[in-house]
Structures are given as C-alpha cells and as structure tokens.
C-alpha cells in the first residue's frame, strides 16, 4: 500500500497557504491542519481572560493556565461547510479568531517559547500517522523536519495586501490599503525575527511564489510535486 505522506506548507502571512494546503488535502483525501488557528486560539484565550496589556502578554498567568490544562484546542469537522473548525474548551471560535483583535495580538503570543512548545507537541501528535497537510511557519523546519514534501509559499507584500484589501472590501469592511501593507510587513518581520522557530525556508523546501499565479495554478504545481513523491515511493 502507498504510504501516506506528510506535507508541510510554510510561508509568509496572507499569501494563501491555507487555500493551497486545503486544495492539496482535498485532492489527496488527506487531513488538513491549520496551525495558525492554534496560535490564534491561544491568543483568543489571552484576550478573553485579559492576560495582556497593549502588546505585552502576562506570560506567568498564561503559563499557569496552559500547564493547568485550561486551554484545550481541537478541530471539528463541519459537514455543512465541509471544513474543519477551531474550538477552544468546547466553544466554537472559528469566526472570532479571524478578527482584527486576534490578528493584532497573535504575533506576540506566537513568540512565547512555552506556547510554541505546547502547540508543537500537539501538532506532532496530530500528524504522526501521516496523511496530513499542515500549514504554518515552522512546520518544515521544526515540527516535521522529515516531512516528505515541504513547500515554502510566498508573494510580494504589496500583492498580498491588495488581495486582503479586496477581500475585506467585498465583505463591506472599511479598511485602508496602507494599514494592511503595514500589518503584513510587521507580521513578516516579527515572524522571521523571533528567537524560537523563526519563519525561514527549509533547505529542502520547494519555493513557490504565487504573486502571478492563480489559485488553480498554484494548486496544480503543488499537487504535481506531491504526486511525484507518491509515485516515487511506490517503486
Ligand atoms: O497563518 P496565520 O496568519 O493564521 O497565523 C497566525 C500567526 O501565528 C502568525 O502571525 C504567525 C503565527 N504562527 C506561527 O508562529 N507558527 C505557525 N506554525 C503558525 C502560525
């Protein structure tokens, strides 16, 4: 039987990693795991419990709650929307974690080493059987350094911001393109410069720049890479 492989999709913020990872997972009938949602869920807990001031996190209190098992994250499949959704302590928080409040605080939460350790352990446990596509920032470098396929996805910051701007405008949100460019560049900087598991391309990752690709084109390229590995494994 063909071995089920592990596929890591890392890359910059807002470049369509989750769309790509979902497309690959759907094609191969694999599980998709959104690790960004896990960092967002911890951030939501921080906000709900007021464990922060400005961008400073009350790490002592957060560690206490994390160690006491008060922060339980899981994904449940929503058959109506045909997607898995994030739950925190049994509460559906999929919509809340995508909002601006969580987005603005998630990078400072994601730099905390004990938060990363906890979530990385969970991610390894979720993926140990293979048959998964996991997207994040440190999947190919740290969570699964032996992943069978590693894709590093990127696009120009201005193009990413324009896409995000169009998306938010379509939802009727009042946003400025300038503010989005600033947020994206800030997140790129924090993600790539943090001490623990910074965002960087693994040596053996395939670089995919989708600045001038459609979603279908990027999916086709990635699926081809995955299929090559699966075929090679068969021989
Ligand atoms: O992919 P996303 O935008 O939902 O991720 C939210 C934040 O979480 C992002 O700013 C960086 C962080 N993150 C991380 O540090 N490591 C991961 N594996 C996934 C996300």
Image: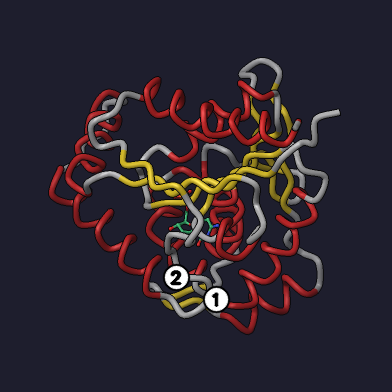
* Count of picture labels: 2
Q: Quadrant of the C terminus?
A: top right
Residue 87 in the figure: left or right of residue 109: right
Q: Is residue 230 above or below residue 207?
A: above
Question: Dot 1, crowdedness within 10 Å: few (<14), some or many (≥20)?
Answer: some
Q: Is mark 2 within 8 Å of ligand 1?
A: no
Of 70 and 165, the residue lying toward us? 165
The secondary structure type at the circle numbered 2 is: helix
Can you tell which mark lies on residue 148? none
Residue 1 position by quadrant: top right
- Residue corresponding to mark 1: 112
Could you tell me which residue is drawn at 42 percent across and 44 percent down?
A: 99
Could you tell me which residue is drawn at 68 percent across and 78 percent down?
A: 63
Q: Is residue 63 above or below residue 232?
A: below
Question: Dot 2, crowdedness within 10 Å: few (<14), some or many (≥20)?
Answer: some
Q: Is residue 30 above or below residue 150?
A: above
Could you tell me which residue is drawn at 74 percent across and 57 percent down?
A: 124
Residue 85 placement (x, y as % from top left): 64, 35
Residue 155 in the figure: left or right of residue 43: left
Can you tell which mark lies on residue 108? 2
Could you tell me which residue is drawn at 70 percent across and 23 percent down?
A: 29
Q: Is residue 139 above or below residue 234?
A: below
Residue 207 in the figure: left or right of residue 95: left
């Amino acid at each position: 039987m063909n071995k089920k492989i592990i596929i890591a999709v890392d890359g910059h913020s807002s470049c369509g990693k989750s769309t790509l990872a979902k497309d690959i997972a759907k094609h191969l009938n694999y599980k998709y795991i959104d690790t960004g949602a896990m960092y967002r869920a911890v951030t939501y807990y921080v906000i709900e419990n007021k464990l922060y001031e400005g961008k400073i996190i009350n790490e002592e209190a957060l560690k206490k709650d994390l160690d006491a098992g008060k922060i339980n994250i899981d994904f449940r499949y929503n058959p109506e929307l045909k997607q898995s959704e994030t739950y925190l302590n049994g509460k559906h928080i999929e919509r809340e974690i995508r909002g601006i409040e969580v987005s603005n605080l998630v990078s400072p939460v994601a730099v905390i080493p004990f938060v990363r350790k906890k979530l990385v352990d969970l991610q390894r446990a979720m993926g140990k059987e293979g048959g998964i596509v996991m997207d994040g920032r440190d999947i190919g470098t740290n969570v699964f350094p032996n992943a069978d396929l590693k894709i590093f996805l990127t696009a120009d910051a201005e193009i990413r911001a324009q896409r995000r701007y169009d998306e938010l405008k379509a939802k009727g949100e009042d946003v400025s393109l300038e503010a989005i460019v600033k947020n994206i560049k800030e997140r790129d900087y924090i993600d790539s410069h943090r001490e623990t598991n910074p965002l960087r391309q693994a040596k053996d990752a395939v670089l995919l720049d989708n600045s001038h690709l459609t979603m279908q084109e990027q999916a086709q390229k990635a699926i081809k890479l995955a299929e090559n590995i699966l075929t090679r494994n068969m021989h």
